[in-house]
Image: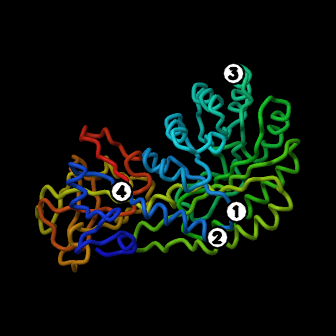
Amino acid sequence: MTNHSAAAFDRDAGRIAVGGVPVDRLADRVGATPFFAYDRRLLTERVALLRATLPREVQLSYAVKANPMPAVVQHLAGLVDSFDVASALEMRTALDTPMPPHRVSFAGPGKTDAELRQAIAAGVTIEMESENEADRVAALGRQLRIRPRVAVRVNPDFAVKGSGMRLGGGPQQFGVDCERVPALLKELANADVEFLGFHVFAGSQNLRADSLCEAQRRTVDLAIRLAEESPLPVRYLNLGGGFGIPYTDRDTPLDLATIGANLADLVRGPIRQGLPEARVVIELGRYIVGECGVYVTRVVDRKISRGRTYLVVDGGLHHQLAASGNFGQAIRRNYPLAVAERIDAEPVETVTVVGCLCTPLDLLGDAVTLPRADVGDLIVLFQAGAYGLTASPTAFLSHPAPAEVLV
């Protein structure tokens, strides 16, 4: 199964290669299957593409939750401008890199006092999700005798069409409703905190450039309106991200050039006029790492059941939940996959690729056409660089955890 996902990776005598290393050799190097492998070259090239396409005034923040592997985060520390984290462990991972603490932001609902204390002590920016959280941050800052760096995450009064997951509009656990923000800003003006600005993230996994452009325009309009009511200057504006990647043959890759042109109009027009002090940030996770990784698993059984051929592999949904269709898909569609050692061979049979778990949900490829694969062959699932291992139920049925390598 040759596809746009496989095309980015190197080839070696008909074998898929990650970081220039053929996957079968990489399996020997890792020592066992299954495993995740991330391509350092592809990560660097993806950030370079963003730099070349987006306006220079827009800074890049990597959302660590997409892939928190320490080696990946370390590599990206030298390529992006900042990190966004969603837990204390992600924060520690980010702070272990050369990224300055003031270029790390901490978002997400339900932050505990212990996490907030760590963030304040470290000097990272806390993107506050509620009035209660704002009160706790101010109180903890007084206890620690440290002035917290804060921004307000805003729940906008609009949603983004075409997003795989909506994070704004209507009632949300994320952010402060935009109509309540002015009152909170007045309270922050009287608190001993360093207010920076706003974070607005309205949706994720969107392949429609027109929808993303509209969301960015509406986000800028909203931020300017809120800034006009703020007694404090706005020096930071996180426009969110939501840039999607194609997961199936039906998906059309995102038109990044259109988004870049729209952002250029915004930063050189309304943002320059209405928010002249603001550092403008686009926060991306999946778009940076998603297409740079593969999940490699080995065929351990080949069987025929009432006319259907099954390839049973040693991996499954406990490592790569999204590929099984159980991570936000309304309609299950196959992720691109291939027989690693025969990447250029013609498909000769239709098979169903299943994992090793005792559940019919453990389906990695339903009726896919592949070159013949036998016991011992390696199957590669593409688009595995984001929301793979850490978004999967790794403890389910107590199978060993897979390795992760950056090559």
Relative to 91, does residue 254 appear above or below in the rendering? below
Q: Which of marks 1 and 2 is nearer the N terminus?
A: 1
CB contact under 8 Å: marks 3 and 4: no
Q: Position of residue 44 (x, y in %)?
A: 49, 62
Label 1 neighbour load within 10 Å: few <14, some 14-19, many 20+:
many
Name the residue tied to disc 1: 216
Secondary structure state at the residue bearing disc 4: loop
Q: Is residue 402 left or right of residue 270?
A: left
Secondary structure state at the residue bearing disc 3: helix
CB contact under 8 Å: marks 1 and 2: yes
The Cα atoms of the two marked residues, 4 and 2, are separated by: 30 Å
Q: Identity of the amino acid at label 4?
A: Val
Label 3 neighbour load within 10 Å: few <14, some 14-19, many 20+:
few
The Cα atoms of the two marked residues, 1 and 2, are separated by: 9 Å
Name the residue tied to disc 4: 407
The Cα atoms of the two marked residues, 1 and 4, are separated by: 35 Å
Q: Identity of the amino acid at label 3?
A: Leu
CB contact under 8 Å: marks 1 and 3: no
Q: Is residue 85 left or right of residue 216?
A: left
**Residue 346 lies in quadrant:** bottom left
